[in-house]
Every structure is written in structure tokens, then in C-alpha cells.
Amino acid sequence: MLSAAATWALCQYVYPEISQPIIPTVIIAIIAYFIASLFLIIYDFAGLTILHCFIQDQDYGGTGNTPKGLRSFIDNYYDKDKKDSDDSDDDKKKSDDKPESNKVD
């Protein structure tokens, strides 16, 4: 977007002999979009690779190749997951212990 605006300004003020500044502006905008997309694809691949490695490591227990910072994150995740499952088990036990007064014989 910035390159298209710069091209428009350049065509208007520096090269006033260009009668249709929209044509070079559109061409530069398309080229700039293509180049920016190529750079962002690299970051996309890197992010997906990190996510894939994290999930793979988590599936195998997260102990062998996990960095210390990530290991604490995984441990906190498992602790939270275990606590949530314990809470749901406690709620289930409490509902099983309640006498059912609305039972129809």
C-alpha cells in the first residue's frame, strides 16, 4: 500500500509527463503484494513448523527435547487439564451421592 502511494506521488509530482499514473501504480502494487506474500510465507512456514513440533513433543510426553521454558508451559497445561478433570469427577460424585427425592416407584 505504501509503495503504491509512493508510486502515485512520484508519478504526479516528479514525472508530470506521465498522463495515466494509475497504470504504474497498479503494477507496483501487484509486485509489492507478491514480494510481501513471499516474505510472509516464510514466517507462516516457520510458525506451522514450531506448532507441529510442539504438538508432536506434547504427544510423546514433552520431556526429551523440550526446552526449559516450553517444559514449564506443558507442565502447567497438564496440571490444569488434570485439575479440570478432577473437578468434573468431583461434581459427578456429588451428583451420585445426592438422594433422589423425585424418584417414581
Image: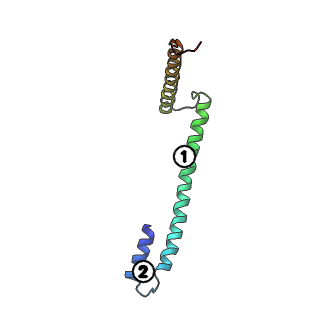
Q: What residue does disc 2 label?
A: 11
Residue 95: give x, y in percent of width and height. Answer: 51, 17
Q: Residues within 10 Å of mark 2 (few under 14, many from 20)?
A: some
Q: Is residue 34 above or below residue 52?
A: below
Quarter of the image for the C terminus: give it: top right
Q: Is residue 47 above or below residue 37?
A: above
Please tell me which of labels 2 and 1 falls first in the chain: 2
Query: In this view, which residue lies farthest toward the front?
Result: 105
What is the number of the mark on residue 47?
A: 1
Q: Position of residue 5 (x, y in %)?
A: 41, 72
What amino acid does circle 2 point to? Cys
Nearer the observer, 43 or 65:
43
Nearer to us in this view, 89 or 99: 99
The image's colouring method is rainbow
Residue at 50% from the left image edge and 33% from the top image edge: 70
Q: Position of residue 16 (x, y in %)?
A: 40, 86
- Callout 1: SS: helix
Query: Quadrant location of residue 56?
Result: top right
Numbered circle sitting on residue 85: none
Spatial CA span between label 2 and label 1: 39 Å
Q: Quadrant of the N terminus?
A: bottom left
Q: Are marks 2 and 1 in contact (CB under 8 Å)?
A: no
| SS type, badge 2 | helix
In this rendered view, identify the residue nearer to me: 82 or 88: 88
Residue 17 % position (x, y): 43, 88
- Tell me which residue sits at (53%, 64%) in the image: 35
User: Quick one: which residue is furthest to the left in this view?
Assistant: 13
Q: Amino acid at mark 1?
A: Gly
